Amino acid sequence: MKKIKLLFGVHMHQPVDNLGDAVDRAIELCYAPFFETMRKYPEFKFALHSSGWLLNEIKTKHPKIFSNIKYLTKKGSIEWVGGGYYEPVLSSIASKDARAQIDKLSLYLQKNLKATPKGCWLTERVWESSIIPDLKACDLEYAVVDDYHFLSNGFDANAIDGYYESEEGGEKMALFPISSSLRYALPFFSVERSIEEIVKYAQNENSAAVVFDDMEKFGLWPKTHEWVYREKWLERFVETVLKDERIVTMHYGEYLKAYRSKGLAYLSNTSYFEMGEWSLGAAQALALETLKKRVGEKYFQSTGVALIKGTVWKNFFIKYPEANHIHKRMLHHSLCQDKFKKNVLESLYRLQTNDVFWHGLFGGIYLPNLRDNAYRYLLEIEASLAKKRVKMVFEDINMDGYEELKILTKSLSLVFSSKHGGSLIEFGSLEKLFNWQNTLMRRYEAYHEKILNPVKNSHIENKNNDAIATIHNADIVVDEALKDELIYDWHPKYSFVDHFSKDEYLFESFKRANYKEVGDFANQPFEFEEAGTKFKRDGGIFLDKKYKTSLTKKYSFHNDKIVLNLSMASDFAYTLHYGMEFNFHFAHPHKVTVNGQSIDDGVALMDVDGIILKDDYTQKFLKIHIDKKCTLYAYILHTLSQNESGFELTAQQISLLFSAPFSSLLDLNISLEVCDV
């Protein structure tokens, strides 16, 4: 009888320093019951990967779970699989950092569990062959990727039942393709249907059914806790596998030593199919989805899978400039890490955690707490570099072809963009390790079509009651009120942003970003005079024709204060309305007040030349003063994003606009100051 080798693996991860409630929920619904169940069956062999941060949280705060893990490791049930300690996408960080992170996790496993990993879990299965030398340098022998990696490179779907060899510069690495059909089957199909999917891989005596997926599917995803534990899916699955004479559980490393590879494989830079789709721009993602439907599932699976695909993971840095800024600031510091003390180096590694850099089915870059964490690590590095005097650097930090002005005072870390109107794009407190400029644009996403044109997923009907829906195919209930929240910004939501309008600004037109802009300054490049801190643009006012207009912004800096002198001259000699926009991120935006007034329903103040924003989280005042009486509008900006349960509105920042009429010439002095409450 042919025996199929079941290589079963699970991966667990939480974003570094994730919200305590979120981690506790994962512990209760998923991690604790999983290991409690598996402890009953030490003869069931499986692979396990955990990010180092999460594993240490479990060891420190949940000793019973760690005891179960330790027991299963000692009994030989668990084969440990390595990777980056803080779960970075290895190909997105420097080689030196990749090796340090892999070694850090391996050393942790050796010290605490007497386990030496020989395999590598790739974060989000992002593969680039350039990482092979780093994996080999860390004594790793194999990595797990998706079968999609192989299928999208023209491999036969019937030949993906083992492992292949690849190389980079002559250094060899074994690659195990994870079965996508098993990923979608376990634990969502009934035990009987799941076993049927496994035995399909019994091509010959050497065949392996390879499955390695998120442990969170076993209890944390919607409806799975009841299915997996209360209805005892996991217990019945393990018992059925152990009793089935056609199946034998095996470790990856064990299989690697016992059987030959299926040959040589060179894989393109890729992740799973959905990731390639998510990393596209919204219009392209919808076009890809349409194309896939047009060719049909049968043609796509047989032929189109090698030809119809999305883009690379790093395209998220193009899609989300906010993520790119954090990433490139991290890379900049990585180049200088030889000067760092051990605790500062640890901040750099934490900053490399992947979750904040992208967005797909889950929140990612849309989650303010993840961005706050990333900026905390970044500002820990900056604080170690701060001196008593103001330090100024002018270089292309974001690698977008335009220079940024970086200012480091004793108290603040500031970055200004020459590409985007000489605006403030980073406003970090070195004392509080908090970035008030951690803002996000409202942008069109492909999944917004589910709100605008909802379609029921009729294919998930399950008459036999032998499966549950996954978050990939569950019906989404759309609240009609969400349509009103689909507002899109036409410029990044930074601060010191210059607007010009022929008509007076109104609260609603500002909030919905549908006022008519007649200037070309808010999102256009400014020239920078390196001898000072002056940004200048020779642009125009566009009405019946273009009127030549010049705008100059000169900044000066103190420990806790930014001062802007703004001057403008235009050929247009009649009345216009100038608006200066600020956007500030707060941990608790609904608790922030403007001049003592709540912002929940929006704020409109007339004839003001200054405001005070009170931040309860940092216990700081942000004070803005303008030497001209203005109208002020302020509102809490929300984004509408997708999550595992459907859609969520997230308060991202407070948007403010100071506006006043002027004719031909404009000369303003504006200050932004941080003070103690």
Image: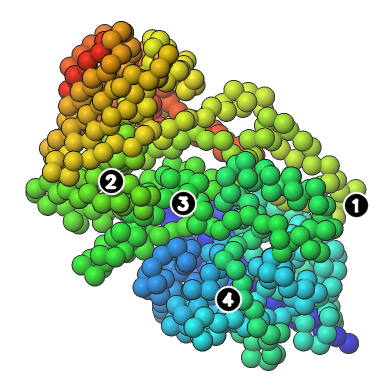
Q: Secondary structure at mark 1?
A: loop
- In this picture, is 562 found above or below 229? above
Q: Secondary structure at mark 2?
A: strand
Residue sitting at 59 percent across and 39 percent down?
A: 445
Marks 3, 2: nearer the viewer: 2
Q: What residue sits right under mark 1 in the picture?
A: 464
Q: Nearer the viewer, residue 13 or 560?
A: 560
Q: Secondary structure at mark 4?
A: strand
On screen, residue 35 versus residue 202, left or right, reads left
Place residue 125 in its image quadrant.
bottom right
Percent x, y of residue 667: 19, 19
Q: What residue sits right under mark 2 in the picture?
A: 404
Percent x, y of residue 328: 36, 55
- In this picture, is 291 found above or below 254? above
Quadrant holding the C terminus: top left
Q: What residue sits right under mark 4 in the picture?
A: 143
Which amino acid is tagged 2?
Glu
- In this picture, is 399 found above or below 83? above
Percent x, y of residue 610: 22, 18
Marks 2, 4: nearer the viewer: 2
